[in-house]
Amino acid sequence: SGSYKNREGSWSEDLSQADVYAQINKDAGTQQDGDSVVKYAGTSVDYRLSSLSAQITNAPFAPDGTDTSQLTCNADVDVEVPLLLHWSGIPPMHTHITVKSGYTPKF
């Protein structure tokens, strides 16, 4: 349920912000654009995500049934959505989103 890497015979967590951005790009069809990721609708910007902050807590590597920890992620991101209207002078919508998710294995 998490990401681990064997380093010199010992398993340790291996998560990075680049991994999170790569997964967002894969799942949402976005593209990296400087410090943000952008989703295009043709040549127009559909939305822009920036200022991603994620706190990821890995589940235990080999749970023994007594540790009830789960993979969790608390994330904050800024979203900008341009208004696709046929007149100018209207600024894009900006909002801040906070997300909390978790995964607990059933088996």
Image: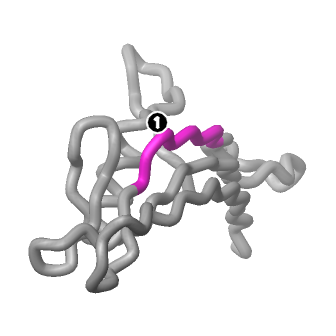
At a point 51% along the width and 65% down the height, the residue shown is: 93
What segment carries the magenta color? 49-56
Q: Tell whether position 80 is magenta.
A: no
Dot 1 corresponds to which residue? 15
Q: Eyeballing the image, is 25 above or below 35?
A: below
Q: Position of residue 46 (x, y in %)?
A: 31, 73
Is 70 on the left or on the right of 23, as rendered? Answer: right
Closest to the observer: 63 or 73? Answer: 73
Please state, as top left, top right, bottom left or bottom right, where the N terminus lies in the image.
bottom right
Residue type of the residue flagged with mark 1? Leu
State how the image is colored: one colour
Q: Residues within 10 Å of mark 1 (few under 14, many from 20)?
A: some
Camera-side residue: 76 or 67?
76
State left or right for residue 4 relative to residue 87: right
State the quadrant of the C terminus: bottom right
| Picture residue at 39% right of the left edge, 75% below the top | 83
Instruction: Measuring from the top left, give residue 91's x and y in whole percent.
Output: 43, 62
Q: Residue at x 73, y 65 (%)?
A: 104
